[in-house]
Image (cartoon, grey):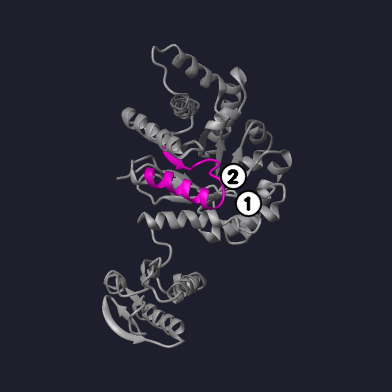
Amino acid sequence: MRIKTPEVQIRDLKMGNNNPIVIQSMTNTDTSDPKATAKQCIELAEAGSQLVRITVNTNLAAAQVPKIRELLDRSGYKHLPLVGDFHFNGHELLTEFPEMAKALDKYRINPGNVGKGDKRDKNFEAFIKVAVANNKPVRIGVNWGSLDQDLLTHFMEKNASLVSPREDREVIIDAVVESALKSAELAEELGLPQNQIVLSVKMSVVPDVIEAYEKLAARMSKSKHFYALHLGLTEAGSGMQGLISSSAALSILLNQGIGDTIRISLTPTPEEPRTKEVEACKTLLQALGYKNFQPKVTSCPGCGRTGSHFFQELAQEVNFHITEKMKDWKTKYPGVEDLKIAVMGCVVNGPGESKHSDIAISLPGKMEKPVAPVYIKGEYLKSLQGSNISNEFIEILEDFIKENY
């Protein structure tokens, strides 16, 4: 059961409370290039990102934010919330560029990157006051790599004085959680409503980020004072490492009811689209049963019983066909994303899986007759054979969708 947090409204998007988990992403374009940034925002939104964050780090970038908003609106993306990501100089930029402050739908601040000592408090206050004046929600995003050093020193010194000091990692986790909650408390004192505050406590090690969010959730539950939570593993890495690490951390937290919005941060390779991290979020939420984004294809990994690579090729072709057709299907056939398909490689699990699928095919393994039975809703339909099985099965799939959605 999800922790019931306050509902945060970001443009027309509602996050937290009983609303579905929100998928978000971030551009990696130079924000001072409004056309390139708006283009990537649209690509991310088309892939399924429900809000997009952009870097606002210089005067040039700040000056172009209203133009980016204008380009999005003119391109049919007036609904898409735009989030400004600020470090070090956000209080200055928001004050000096009021049109930028109005154009953004949400601000992100890292309390460890707003200065030191008295300057830190003054800068944080200036930032929050702009948010209050413009009625904008704020994510207070604490990262362990840029943690407030005064706070960390205090926690470390306190720990060192104990008879049995705890491990440094435990102290750092507690300091990260404390930074988020104290910053949120200060933001409320400055006039930012509880339902306009989102918190995150990101670490780069899976067990640490899980523990940080668990402690944050526990402290909110104890005080009965909740904030919407943004989940993510910072600096997760690229490729398989980034996907597995983020999925492991986010799955455990979401399964505990922790989290209102997610981002899977991946280090992109030159040949990979930025949208890969959005696809990863969708795949994760579908795997956990939160929401279906496209038909699920169950397929076996193959073993010594499977007679060829054909079932692997068929599974790939079916997945490719779904990806190619999904945009059109969503418009024509509402609910098609809940369709269950099975492509199995032999008789061991083929008939069994067919009973749990809407449409299934069981290809022949070694020592089996060279025919591939097709099942609809668990009932035998017909058998396919020969060199045209792929096209025939996809044709049956298309007919099934037309008749049932």
Mark 2: give few (<14), some (14-19) or many (20+) Cα within 10 Å: many
Task: Locate residue 43 relative to residue 155 in the image: left or right.
Answer: right
Specify the amino acid type for callout 1: Arg
Under circle 1, the secondary element is: helix
Q: CA distance from mark 2 to mark 1?
A: 8 Å
Q: Is residue 398 above or below residue 283?
A: below
Q: Do the CB atoms of the residues marked 2 and 1 lie less than 8 Å apart?
A: yes
- Percent of width and height locating residue 23: 48, 51
Looking at the rendering, in which quadrant would you find the C terminus? bottom left
Q: Which mark is residue 243?
A: none
Disc tally is 2
Task: Locate residue 98 relative to residue 207 in the image: left or right.
Answer: right
Mark 1: give few (<14), some (14-19) or many (20+) Cα within 10 Å: many
- Percent of width and height locating residue 315: 44, 72
Q: Residue furthest bottom?
A: 386
Q: Which residues are magenta?
A: 228-253
Q: Is residue 129 visible?
A: no
N-terminal of the pair, mark 2 or mark 1, is 1
Which of the 4 image quarters holds residue 130? Answer: top right
Query: Where is mark 2, residue-wise?
Result: 104
Under circle 2, the secondary element is: loop
Residue found at x 50% / y 53%: 50
Query: Where is mark 1, residue-wise?
Result: 69
Specify the amino acid type for callout 2: Leu
Q: Is residue 149 above or below residue 393?
A: above
Looking at the rendering, in which quadrant would you find the N terminus? top left
- Residue 250 included in the magenta stretch of the image: yes
Foreground pick, 296 / 117: 296
- Residue 154 included in the magenta stretch of the image: no
- Percent of width and height locating residue 392: 42, 85
